Structure formats: structure tokens, C-alpha cells
Amino acid sequence: QVQLVESGGGLVQPGGSLRLSCRASGSIFTIYEMGWYRRAPGKQRELVATIPNDGTRNYADSVKGRFTISRDAMKNTVDLQMNRLKPDDTAVYYCYAGAGTWDQYWGQGTQVTVSS
């Protein structure tokens, strides 16, 4: 089992920045990938960014050039730096970890609201 605890999020004006952080605990040695997903009101959950153990990064087209995912193996954390935020980025953001044999774990979610 892997537990994920998120921090960050909140209200920001368009064009602003926020940083999300997620710390993993439990069976962390089984993790092969971490990342972030989001769910906007009335929409399905969608991928934002992922980073597997080899350090490669995968971004949704909608956030490329604005968001940066990073991972600290020593601290067991994954961060999402979000710049030039838009109202369309408003959503609940979920930390994700892939572990073991294709098991998926999720954080409790943190609200990001982009509004003037």
C-alpha cells in the first residue's frame, strides 16, 4: 500500500503561479511512476503530468510550457509547479502513484481555482 498526501493549491488570479506537492509513504519501494491528474467541474479526470522512475516527463498538451513536474526520490515527493495559470486550469488536482503490479494510488485531492 502507498499513501499520498498533497499540499498546496488555493485561489490565484489568471497569469499567476501555484505549486503543488505530494509526499508518498508506505510501500514506496514499489513505486514506478508518480504524477498529477485533475478533474474540472462536469468533466472527467484527465492526466496533467507524470514522471516515471527513469525521470522522463509526460505532459498534457494543455499544460506544456506552463507546468513543470519534478520528483525527489530521497524525500519521496512529487511537485507540480504551475505558471501562467488560466481559468481553464480550475480543477481538483490529484496526486497519483503507480506501484507494484499496475496498482494505482490517489491522494485526497486539492482544489485549484483560477479566477479574478
Image (cartoon, grey):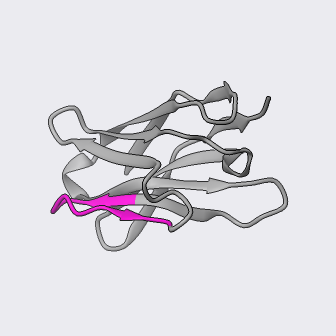
Query: In this view of the protein, which residue sits in the foreground, 29 or 72?
Result: 72
Horizontal arrangement in the rendering, residue 116 relative to residue 16 (left or right): right
**Is 46 or 30 nearer to us in this picture?**
46
Numbered label tally: 0
Looking at the image, residue 18 lies above or below residue 90: above
| Residue at 53% across, 31% down | 17
Residue 6 coordinates in the image, percent (x, y): 49, 34
Q: Position of residue 105 (x, y in %)?
A: 46, 55
Image check: 68 left or right of 40?
A: left
| 77 part of magenta stretch | no
Q: Residue at x 19, y 59 (%)?
A: 53
Return the residue nearer the eye: 59 or 23. Answer: 59
Residue at the image position 17 percent from the left and 42 percent from the top: 73
Query: Quick one: quadrant of the C terminus?
Result: top right
Image coordinates for residue 34, horizontal then vertical, percent: 35, 55
Quadrant of the image occupied by residue 100 = bottom left
Residue numbers of the magenta segment:
50-60
Residue 59 included in the magenta stretch of the image: yes
